[in-house]
Image: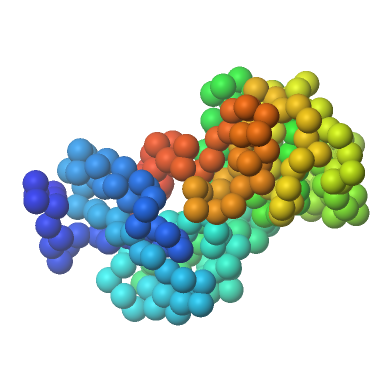
Amino acid sequence: MMNNSNEISRQTRLFGYIGENAGVSRFSAVINKMFKANGDDVMMIPMNIREDDLYFTVANMKKSHVNGAVISNEYVNDIIEILDESSDMVKKTGMCDIVFKEGEKLRGAVFTSRVLTEYLKDIRASKIAVIGVNPHAKAFSFLSCGFNVSYFNENLEELMKLTEEVELKDADLNRIASSMSLDFSDFDALLDFSDFNSLEMIEKFPLLSLDMKNTKEFSALKKRAGELNSKYISYDDMIDKLTAQAYKLITKG
C-alpha cells in the first residue's frame, strides 16, 4: 500500500501517461487519487514526450521499470509498429491508447472508444452523426450496435471502405464539403473524427457534440460549437470516465 506521502517503493507499479503536454492533463492526478483511495501500490507519472522522441520512449519501456502507459490522443495512431502484441481492436482500427509491458514485450489495447460509447448510452443518445474515417471512427463503429449512425465524409469512397472494413451493411453515407450548409439538429449527438480545419459548413448542431481531442489540440468542432453556442465535450471533459476505465484495466491483474 502506498503511504500518505505518496512515496514510491521498489514494489510500486509505475505507469506513464504519455503525451506532448501530459503534465497539464488531469489524467495522472485523477487516477493517482483512485490508486491511493483503494490502497493500490501503483502510480502514474505524466511524461511530456515530443513526437520525435515518442518511438524511442515507448520502445525503451520494454527494459524499463515502467509497467505500461496510457497514450494521449495525439499519439494513438503512432505507436502500432512498436507493439509486440495487439488486441483485436488495435489490429482492426490501427490505433492504441493503452500499453502494458509483459516481460519484455509490449501489448497494446484500446479503451477510450468503449468509454465514449458507454457515455452516449448513459445520456440515452440514439441517433448519432459521425464525421470522418480515422481510427476513432472505426473503433466507434465496431462498438456502435444499438445506435442509429449516419456517416459523413468529404470522400465517399473512403466512407464505403470504412463501412466495408467494419462490416456495416446499408449504412447511411453522406458527403460533406465546405461549400455545403449542414443541419445536424435532428441527431442526438455529433462525433467529429475528421481532419477538417474548419466546420463552418455546420449551421445547426445537435444537443451534444464530441471529439476525442484534448485541450492542447486544435478542435474545429470546439471552435464551431463555440461560435453557435452549442455544447461541446472533449477528451478532457471525460477524464473521470476515462480514468475509471483505465483504472480497471491497470488493476485487474
Q: Is residue 44 above or below residue 102?
A: above
In the figure, is residue 79 to the left or right of 227?
left
Q: Is residue 63 above or below residue 129?
A: below
The residue nearer to you, when weighing 151 against 108, is 151
Outermost left residue: 4
- Please indicate, yes or no, whether residue 55 appears anywhere in the rendered image: no
Type of colouring: rainbow
**Residue 100 location in percent, x, y?**
41, 62
**Residue 184 location in percent, x, y?**
77, 28
Looking at the rendered structure, the number of numbered marks drawn on it comes to: 0
The residue nearer to you, when weighing 54 against 24, is 24
Q: Is residue 59 above or below residue 129?
A: below
- Please indicate, yes or no, whether residue 198 appears anywhere in the rendered image: yes
Outermost front residue: 227
Q: Residue at 68% of width from left, 38% of height from top? A: 224
In the figure, is residue 152 to the left or right of 234?
right
**Residue 171 location in percent, x, y?**
86, 37
The residue nearer to you, when weighing 224 against 55, is 224
Q: Residue at 25% of width from left, 60% of height from top? A: 13
Q: Residue at 44% of width from left, 36% of height from top? A: 241
In which image quadrant can residue 65 be found?
A: bottom left
Q: Residue at 63% of width from left, 27% of height from top? A: 230
The residue nearer to you, when weighing 163 against 136, is 136
**Residue 187 location in percent, x, y?**
74, 24
In the figure, is residue 99 to the left or right of 137?
left
In the figure, is residue 122 to the left or right of 139?
left
